[in-house]
Image: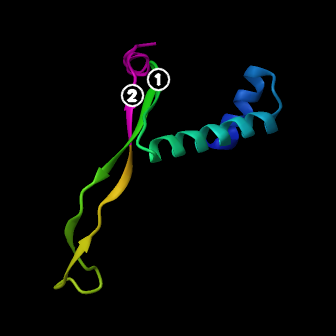
Amino acid sequence: MNKATLIETLSEKTGLNKLHVESVLDNMQKIIINTIKGGDIVSLTGFMTFSSRTRRARMGVDPRNPKEKMEIPAVLVPKFKAGKALKDALKAKD
């Protein structure tokens, strides 16, 4: 399912028009990004937890010159953890 299909499905389920649903999704995305960028956690109980962690700096190989080493700097990366309700729903046999 892509974003357009999700917007259409949510619009049908909620009775809201597609522009409102798209606005809500866009704002939700911005809020989650800004929150985890700041080091906080966004937890949607039972569904998913969004957080961030720092991937440490490390040495790598320069792809243009494999004989040379290069330092790869530390970077902030997203982390996701599935909630119990989501895990249970996926385990359930229909």
Q: Which residue is mark 2?
A: 82
Q: Is residue 33 left or right of residue 7?
A: left
Give the residue at x 16% y 85%.
67
Q: Amino acid at mark 2?
A: Ala
Q: CA distance from mark 2 to mark 1?
A: 6 Å
Residue 34 pos. (x, y %): 53, 45
Q: Is residue 83 magenta?
A: yes
* Mark 2: few/some/many CA within 10 Å (<14, 14-19, 20+): some
| Quadrant of image for the N terminus | top right
Residue closer to the observer: 28 or 35: 35
Residue 31's label in the rendered image is: none
The residue at the far right in this view is 17
Residue 9 pos. (x, y %): 70, 29
Mark 1 secondary-structure assignment: loop
Q: Is residue 57 magenta?
A: no
Q: Which residue is mark 1?
A: 47
Give the residue at x 45% y 42%.
36
* Mark 1: few/some/many CA within 10 Å (<14, 14-19, 20+): few
Q: Earlier in the sequence, mark 2 or mark 1?
A: 1
The magenta region covers: 79-94
Q: Amino acid at mark 1?
A: Phe
Residue 84 pos. (x, y %): 38, 18
Where is 83 relative to 8, above or below? above
Where is 88 relative to 69, above or below? above
Give the residue at x 39% y 28%.
82
Give the quadrant of residue 5. Answer: top right
Give the residue at x 34% y 59%.
75
